[in-house]
Amino acid sequence: MKLRRVSPGIVATAAVMVAVGLGVPLVVDQFQLLQLTVFASMCILALSLGVVWGYGGILCFGQSAFFGLGAYTYAVTAVNLAESTLAILLSIVVPAVFAALLGYFMFYGRLSDVYLGVITLSVTLIFFNLMNSTAGDAYRIGTARLNGFNGMPSLPTFNVPGNPGRLLDPTETFYLVMALLLSVYVGLHALLASHFGRVVVAVRENETRCELLGYDVRLHKLLVFTLGGAIAGLAGSLFANWGAFVSPNVFSLSTTSQIIIWVIVGGLGTLVGPIIGCVLMQYLATELGTQQLANTSLMFGIIFLAFVLLVPRGIVPSLGVVRARLSAVRARPPA
Amino acid sequence: MTEPILQTVGLSIRFGGVEAVRGVNLCLAERELRCLIGPNGAGKSTLFKLLTGQLQPTAGRILFHGEDITGDHTHAIARRGIGIKTQVPNLFDSLTVRDHLWLAARRTNSRPRADAITDEIIERVGLGAIAGGMVGRLSHGLRQWVELGTVLAGNPELILLDEPAAGMTHDEVARTAELVREINRTHALIVVEHDMQFVRMIARTVTVMHQGAVLVEDTMDQILKNSAVRDIYLGKHGGA
Ligand SMILES: Nc1ncnc2c1ncn2[C@@H]1O[C@H](COP(=O)(O)OP(=O)(O)OP(=O)(O)O)[C@@H](O)[C@H]1O
Ligand SMILES: [Mg+2]
């Protein structure tokens, strides 16, 4: 049997993550460290849609539903327990279960791609409206008040497992988030290289052929969709922990469209693409936000349009094409 | 007589006003090679879609090894051991030839075994030159072979081939015929084909469909002499 080689691109990306994770806290100030922490958390969110859409071929316009659900699950559990370990776990499990139920309805009901987009988008907007209307004392889960559009402030942040008194400081939180990002990135690549992952890609390419070879297309879509929900939920808990705050905005149209833009800008069908797209766009949003030069939403809209029209495949796949052309030119014998 | 591998009883499907398949009773023995011919629109491909669960019959039953598989899901039928090369090849365009064979083999085999089967099929179908290439870029003739190889890698007991020689040169047709005969040593096959030279190279029993129904079933020689068959083909396939 042939040794299966790990692609150099994956090794390089993982190495960059390790270097950033270990090196950055030494050279940046507290403010920048917090910025990078939320960037990395959002990269995990970008990966969740990157695998569902880019590899599973499932057009999900409502990835924020699972992100928000994870954030709220974390908030409610952490407030009630005053301990973060179980809250983090539940922030993965609850969105995953929800994604599984929603996915079962969509895939086993054989809904077409367009409806998938519409339904997932509707679901996140329903959550948005639902959470917005939870103002008042009546809306509480245990001791946690949901607070409607004002959101839930002063959430307990991450503590050392089993030791609620020992909270993680910003540097430790950054290490944790980077370690999670690395694990999700490497884990997803390992999964995609497995039999299951290769079938997922095959399903994206041709559902009929998969069925004719004996693979259950619905099941594979359901599983990858559920996995995406779980990863988005994890990102949600990281986000809630980052600001010690969560509001219905996590479910908003602007949140869900941002995730889509990250993936489109970075490139569908790669994992490093959504990460690059996410970091780039967030950096841009922060810069635009601080300089007040232009309206951020407007700029995002323009960038989105520019990419759809000019670089429809996204940065990373386009770089791949350029590289292939260059090496073809180099390989050509001199005339 | 042993139990047939495949049997259909009064199999029918109606699309609005058109009955594309009408009361088809088909009986296929183990390791039989059956040719299925008929003019355009006779219902051959539709019959294959019924057999593989891609369409549900409006009447009738399908038995595989005596078990009723009517209404089963496509993937469940494939798991029982029916494989198909469709008329318009169904392939994974951004994957390589090797990926196709591996995915087909891997469903029922361990990873090393699937690797070995992949190499074996590449050799057997003669896909070596294109094994690492993306399938989306291949010609129709090569796509036919890739799909044939993919079906073989899954090793289904019954193989359905819908126009396997379409888009091939004369030499390629001859090679495909040879391959079909070789496959038939271990597998049952139903082959749909318009190319009469190809049919003549492989045929034993031939079933002729016309307007959704089975017109006649006989040996190739008798079919060629049959006046009803000649009538339905006249004009279109006068050479048959
Ligand atoms: N999904 C469908 N809806 C409506 N009519 C259909 C459908 N599929 C097939 N038909 C009709 O059923 C009839 C049989 O079509 P089929 O494709 O099975 O013919 P065929 O024998 O395979 O012909 P060919 O040799 O041209 O491939 C045709 O009249 C076709 O128009
Ligand atoms: Mg046909």
Image (cartoon, coloured by chain):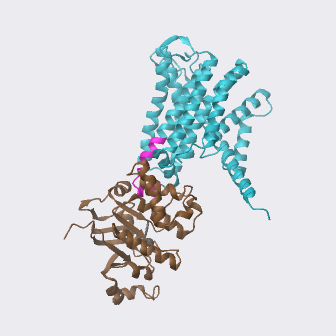
Q: Percent from the top left, x then y, of residue B28?
A: 28, 70
Task: Point out the image quarter for the C terminus of chain B.
Answer: bottom left
Residue A159 in view (yes/no): yes
Residue A133 in view (yes/no): no
Q: Which residues are magenta?
A: A207-224
What count of labels does the image hold?
Answer: 0
Residue located at (73% from left, 47% from top): A306
Label the magenta part by its dominant secondary structure: helix
The chain assigned the colour cyan in the figure is: A
Report which quarter residue A41 is drawn in: top right
Is residue A147 positioned above or below A207 on the image? above
The chain assigned the colour brown in the figure is: B
Task: Indicate left or right for B226 with A65 as reference.
Answer: left
Q: Is residue A297 magenta?
A: no
Residue located at (71% from left, 22% from top): A32
Q: Percent from the top left, x then y, of residue B18?
A: 39, 71
Task: Indicate left or right for B88 with A254 as reference.
Answer: left
Q: Percent from the top left, x then y, of residue A328?
A: 71, 57
Report which quarter residue B14 is drawn in: bottom left
Name the quadrant where ligand 2 sits.
bottom left
Identify which residue, A235 or B21, lies in the foreground: A235
Identify which residue, A245 or B92, lies in the foreground: B92
Residue located at (44% from left, 82% from top): B197
Residue located at (45% from left, 71% from top): B164
